[in-house]
Amino acid sequence: MIVAERKPLAEILNMVRDCKKILVLACRGCVSVCSAGGEREAEILASLIRLGMKKNGKSCEVIEGSLVRQCDREYIEGIDQWQGQYDAIVSTACGVGVNFIANLRPADNVFPALNTTFFGGSAEQGIWSEQCAGCGDCVLHLTGGLCPVARCAKSLMNGPCGGSVDGRCEIDPNVDCVWQMIYDRMGRLDRQEEMAKSAPIRDWSTAGHGGPRKQIRKDLTVS
Amino acid sequence: MSFTPDIRLFSCHYTSQQSCAHEGKELQELGFPENIQLTRIPCTGKLEVSTMLKAFEDGADAVYVVGCPVDGCHNVQGSQRAAKRVAAVREMLQELEVEPDRVRMYHLNRGLHPEFIDAGIEMNQRIEKIGPSPF
Ligand code: SF4
Ligand code: SF4
């Protein structure tokens, strides 16, 4: 899922400093699962904005709403139900949701309440970690299922580098060296031989270095 | 400047069970500050961050929570969860540049003990000193 965290309150309060009517809009997708921008967090943020505005001597009406997701056209249309009740939307969705509102509602002010951090998962309650960087040309079949793009500090394609010490990465002794993990895992799977092949020079154009990426599924399009 | 703080207390059934004795008069008789508004909840683990924030929106000068001892919660981890949520609200107040001590967590033994009264008096004195809420 997409993982995100709330921006510092001062930053959000500064975005909305001149607003009189705010819609804090939750997303019930990924950000609700990672407890950053679901209905519960939007309720908290709405309260904090009301308190912050009041403390700053500003009067402002803050309402809350939520959408199933903010990354699909049909759900964004649901914003119509609050028409006239806001002069700005503070979205607690990931950056995709904020972009979708900006794309589809040219007359609406929209502000991000979250910093979208990474694609990851939660192995332990309350802790999330990055697992994939969406590089567009997955190599997990070569690495025993462990991602070197997202989990190696240098995104190396044939590590480990010389900075790997006792299974830890040179950037931080608390960070596992994913290439050591790949090596150990491939050994356990009796596939270590595969690692002797040197990885070809990689074409990173699929990883966003070729401009914004787009995906078309002809079997799903309607026109 | 002396003022009478508006203080909201959220307490679980177990730590405040005798607050209802003598039609609620026992607390008063024991010197519990009258300006503390007590809301009893089944378990402090059920208390939401938003409920504490709403109390401030509603005019509270301070909010405190009384739950079971850390290692002796009737619902195992309820009071530990409450303590984490109280800590989260303290951080939020700090972000708003408001004194974090307007929110406190107390872990007390079940039943009505002098500590329950003391916590109320302590909280009241603390907030009298800090002053009215800036909200
Ligand atoms: S190789 Fe690319 S697509 Fe595969 S997990 Fe890593 S970042 Fe994601
Ligand atoms: S030590 Fe490991 S994880 Fe760190 S940069 Fe080198 S190969 Fe990557």
Image (spheres, coloured by chain):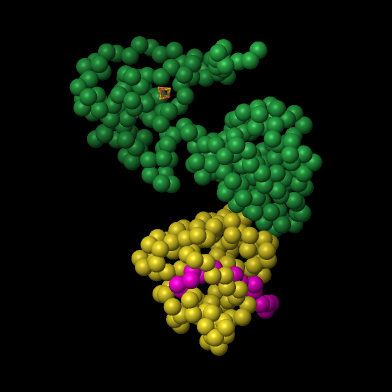
Q: Nearer the viewer, residue A151 or A124?
A: A124
Prevailing SS of the magenta stretch: loop
The C terminus of chain B lies in quadrant: bottom right
Q: Is residue B58 above or below residue A187?
A: below
Looking at the picture, how far across and down is residue A36, in whole percent?
54, 43
| Residue under the image location 74 percent in, 41 percent down | A82
Looking at the picture, how far across and down is residue A23, in whole percent?
70, 44
| Residue under the image location 53 percent in, 41 percent down | A32
Q: Relative to residue A49, is residue A155 drawn left or right? A: left
Residue A220 falls within the magenta-colored stretch: no
Q: Is residue B13 above or below residue A75?
A: below
Looking at the picture, how far across and down is residue A68, in whole percent?
60, 37
Q: Is residue B115 above or below residue A25?
A: below
| Residue under the image location 77 percent in, 31 percent down | A107
Chain B color in figure: yellow
Q: Relative to residue A8, is residue A145 drawn left or right? A: left
Q: Relative to residue B15, is residue A146 drawn left or right? A: left
Q: Which residues are magenta?
A: B1-15
